[in-house]
Amino acid sequence: MASTAPKSATDLEAFAPIEVLAPDKEVRDLQRLADARAGDTKAGRSEMTHCFVEAYRRLHLGRFDAARFLEALGPKASRVALFCVEAEPGACHRSLVADFLAQEFGLEVVHLR
C-alpha cells in the first residue's frame, strides 16, 4: 500500500509481523493440493486458488482487527508496505490483506514490482 519505496533505512520506522495474517498450515495445504492437481508450482503460480482465498478470508482476515491495526500505526503513518517474495501480487496472501484494508478504509493500493 505504499506509493513509493523507502529511500533509505531511516524511512523504515517499524517492521511488525502480524501473526494472525500468516497463512497457517491448513490454508497453505489447500493451495499446495490445488497446485499439485493443476501441475503448478509455487514459483509458477500467478494467482491463488479460490479455495485458498476463501479459507484465508474466513480464517485469517475474519480474525484481523483492521481498526486496531490502523490505530496501532499511529497518526504519523502515511504509508504501509506489505512485503512479499512473490513475483505476482495475485499469488500472495498479502494482496488479500491489501484489498481488505483498501475496502475497509478507502485506501489506494499500489503494487510495486
Image: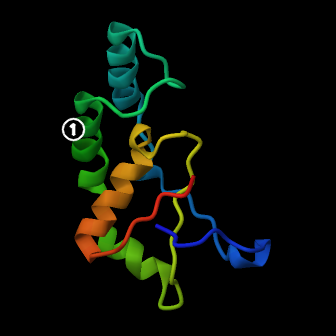
In the image shown, does 12 or 68 lie closer to the viewer? 12
Kind of residue sitting beneath label 1: Glu
Q: Residue at x 38, y 16 (%)?
A: 35
* Residue 58 spot, x, y in % from top left: 21, 44
- Residue closest to the far bottom: 75
Res. 65 in view:
no
80 vs 34: above or below? below
Q: Residue at x 31, y 47 (%)?
A: 60
Q: Residue at x 54, y 25 (%)?
A: 43
* Residue 73 spot, x, y in % from top left: 49, 79
Q: Residue at x 28, y 76 (%)?
A: 105
* Residue 102 spot, x, y in % from top left: 31, 68
SS at mark 1 in the image = helix
- Residue closest to the far right: 9
- Residue closest to the far front: 113
The residue under label 1 is: 54
Residue 67 figure quarter: bottom left
In the image shown, does 48 or 19 lie closer to the viewer? 48
In the image shown, does 52 or 63 lie closer to the viewer? 52
